[in-house]
Image (tube, rainbow, N blue to C red):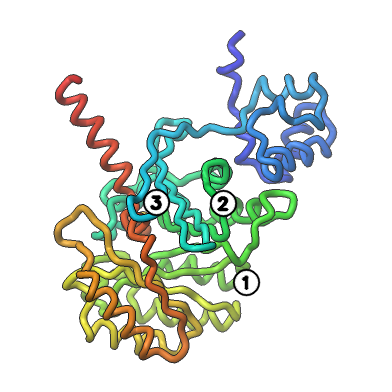
Amino acid sequence: MQTKQLVNHYLLNYSKLELQEFVQLMGLEKFRGDQIYKGIFNQALEDIDQLSTLSKKIRNQISDISEIRQFQLVKTTKSEKDDTTKFLWELADGKKIESVIIYEGKRVTFCISSQVGCALDCKFCATGKMGFLRNLNSGEIIEQVLTMKNLAKNKPTNIVFMGMGEPLLNLKNVLKASDIVSDPDGLAFSKNKITLSTSGVIPGINKLAEMKSPYSLAISLNSVFEDKRQQIMPISIQYPINDLMDTIQKYVKTTKKKVTFEYILIKNINDSKEDADELLKLTHRLPCKINIIPCNSDDPEYQPPSEKKVKWFSDYIYDNNKTSTVRLRKGWEIQAACGQLYYKHENAIGKKLVSGN
Ligand code: SF4
């Protein structure tokens, strides 16, 4: 029987309402959709046969035309310094994405991707070099969380959209996934522990302010000087830093929430006293957190400063600011290298194909 060919419903990609509609189209009662929803999200069941609230007949009916999980694990790498782990997944269409688990004391952060590749071409980021391939659907976003929950040492305490892609350019699916992850009948994860990290997409920030988003917002700042920011983050040409800061001011006022600024520290590019002073000046009136992350790139132009310089920079920001919480995110270097695992893997395959091995 060609059951495989009929499988085309990816159940993780459906909201509660969509699952209710799906079962009704099959001639079943609406509440069956709620049972599937709880089973696949709340209980994290991976196989339709495990949905014991449904009869065998209904399970067969559903499994003939649908599946719950799609990911294949391609590769895992672990940091030598700590247990921080990066995963490369293959999606149903053969495309690949990365996700990361970062352990810092009691904190367990899942860094997840929102797109395959990215159009924004930040110069220090390997994902930017891939270009944009496609948006992830909400099921693919959630499957990263569900699968890593099985592989992590501890439960996640934080989920951040800091993997591949710009989440505010795939806002509809990112919000749909976040709503399911934080739904008590879904993954029951705390809303304010979900962070959307943007490179500064102003219309997306305005939209989050307008809807009074319950999720946290982080801005990948990386330089406070317009010319330098444009050089390392071309998005700053479209959305200049002054407009971005005005938008963030409005966001903070409307949502009454703090924002986080991510600052990837790059040797001889954004690590001087002048950079630190300007960063302090720009952020001093905002309720915010500042995360300093040493750069980790394969590109010789974008290297981290010496450990001494990294410490000096973060101490200087810490000592001289009045309003923000400053953290030097040490285990995060692996994440600042977003896209590298994909690149290494694809290059290795390319070399094999060329050499015919
Ligand atoms: S840092 Fe983020 S926004 Fe910039 S290219 Fe990489 S994935 Fe895209």
Q: Which is nearer the N-term, disc 3 or disc 2?
A: 2
Q: Position of residue 137 (x, y in %)?
A: 53, 44
The residue to which callout 3 is attached is 164
Q: Which of marks 1 and 3 is in front?
A: 3
Tell me if mark 3 has few (under 14), some (14-19) or many (20+) residues whose alpha carbon lies within 10 angstroms of its own. Answer: many
In the rendered structure, the answer to whether residue 315 lies left or right of residue 135 reads: left
State the CA–CA distance, disc 1 to disc 3: 25 Å
For badge 3, the amino acid type reads Met
Query: Residue type at mark 2?
Result: Asn
| Residue drawn at point x = 47 percent, y = 57 percent | 103
Tag 1: amino acid: Lys
* Mark sitting on residue 75: none
Which numbered disc, 1 or 3, marks the residue that appears first in the sequence? 3
- Local packing at callout 2 (Cα closer than 10 Å; few below 14, some 14-19, many 20+) is few
According to the image, label 1 marks what residue? 212
Please tell me in which quadrant of the rendered image residue 124 appears: bottom left
Q: In this view, does 167 lie above or below 357?
A: below
Specify whether 58 is left or right of 148: right
What whole-number distance in Å separates the C-alpha atoms at marks 3 and 2? 23 Å
Q: Which of marks 3 and 2 is in front?
A: 2
Q: Where is the N terminus found, in terms of image quarters? A: top right
Q: Residues within 10 Å of mark 1 (few under 14, many from 20)?
A: some
Name the image quarter holding residue 162: bottom left
Please give the residue where the numbered disc 2 appears in the rendered image: 154
Which quadrant: the C terminus? Answer: top left
Distance from mark 3 CB to nearest ligand 1 atom below 8 Å = yes
Tell which circle, 2 or 1, labels the residue nearer the N-terminal end: 2
